[in-house]
Amino acid sequence: MIPHTPSETPPPNLSALAEDHYFSANPPPKDLEKHIALAKDFIDFHAAAGRRLVLVTSGGTTVPLEKQTVRFIDNFSAGTRGATSAEYFLEAGYAVLFLHRQFSLLPFSRHYSHATDCFLDFLREGPDGSVIARDEDAGKMLHVLRKYREARDKKMLLVLPFVSISDYLHELRSITRLMRPLGPKALLYLAAAVSDFFVPPERMSEHKIQSTDAADSVLQAKKKVAAATEEEETFDNFDSSPKVPRSKRLVVDLDPVPKFLKNLVEGWSPEGMIVSFKLETDPAILVHKARYSLDRYQHHLVIGNLLATRKWEVVFVSPGNPDKWIRVPRNKALTGASPSTASPALAAETQSDEPLDPKSLPEAEPDLEIESLIIPAVSELHTKYINSIEQRRQQKQLSV
Ligand code: PMT
């Protein structure tokens, strides 16, 4: 190895530079300090109890087009994966810090929000004028209510919202740094659908982007107002017809969001186990992309899923292990009474390394939530991870 001479400068840490630049250029959300205080209190409480704690990220991130935001770019995620997973993590004894896109699905209340049935359809008026659950819904509602109250009363669940991509990244960095006292008992489960592109603040309009030059005309010269108003009535900026001159179209120019998984692995949360998700739409590239992400960021598990089949199957890609598909049986008839009596068709389907054909799936939702299979499998890997870190610590102590 060639030693450094004093005149040589060490190579710049590019991800640290990108991080500094991103976080100084993009302002933090207004509630960040409040969220940090809540998260610190929650994390310290569970670290002192020696409990496992999972940070679940959930929902989509918005990409604002204006600083005073009227318009933004969004994505499909409703937060189903995150909210459902949070419930199964609680069931498995984890404390859950649920960092979610504001107004996306929440653990427990998800059973009654965003549904095709309106929440009020689950209720009726009692004979004394009280509000009560409909008889057919009361059993499940009581069960969900008890689970929710138990999580809240035992301080096992903390729910914090974000909206935009930069809110999310500020919150993620601050919270994961606070998780260090948990050591390997921290688990990061990054299910949020994070935008890969954004408008940097220096190119972002302060006010609502105008679809006409009417406002300019007002500011520039009163005499142009009449002509500008006339133009406003006839001009539609969102019409992409070639007849619309390019100068009057809205052209959105986005920069890539720096990939922060590397910083997360190396600096923000050095001892926790990190699980990221990889979403694709093309089955042919899913496993390759998941493995690529694992090799690139050197974390502990990538859970791959396809948009069309994400409620039916996922694939676990982890270092040193073969890819492991987790699948919901397609119907009870296929399942059999127990694993030993499961039909050969089910066994073949469960073990196959080929992604399911979306066309072969029933239209209805699966009978079983796939998160009820994912979380025990993640928790098992987390146990192995904690044990391996403990063993390493003990070996170090012995060798000193
Ligand atoms: O909410 P649902 O409707 O239930 O949908 C769930 C889901 C499909 C959104 C979820 O299961 C899922 O796959 N979430 C991750 C989708 C995603 O953002 O994939 P990606 O390829 O863009 O990112 C992969 C990983 O890189 C993410 O875990 C993210 O933490 C990380 N990342 C992403 C962007 C970025 N700038 N920096 C990052 O570190």
Image: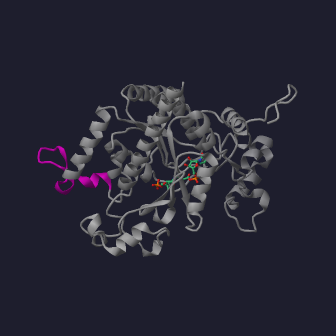
Image location (x, y in percent) of residue 179: 49, 31
Residue 24 point in image, percent of width and height: 68, 32
Vertical comparison of 56 with 321: above or below: above
Residue 345 in the image: x percent, y percent? Answer: 36, 75
The quarter of the rendered structure image containing the N terminus is top right
In the rendered image, is residue 239 in sight? yes
Q: Residue 23, how many percent across, how many down?
A: 66, 34
Q: Is residue 127 magenta?
A: yes
From which residue to which does the magenta span run?
Answer: 118-137
Q: Residue at x 52, y 35 (%)?
A: 271
Q: Quadrant of residue 328?
A: bottom left
Q: Would residue 116 be found to the left or right of residue 182 on screen?
A: left
156 or 8: nearer the viewer: 8
Q: How is the image coloured?
A: one colour
User: Residue shown at 54%/37% (left/top)?
Assistant: 172
Q: At 75% from the left edge and 68% from the top edge, which residue is drawn?
A: 242
Query: Nearest the camera: 366 or 110?
Result: 366
Identity of the residue drawn at 80% across and 43% down: 221
Q: Is residue 219 above or below residue 399?
A: below
In the foreground, 79 or 340:
340
The answer to whether 159 appears left or right of 213 in the picture is left
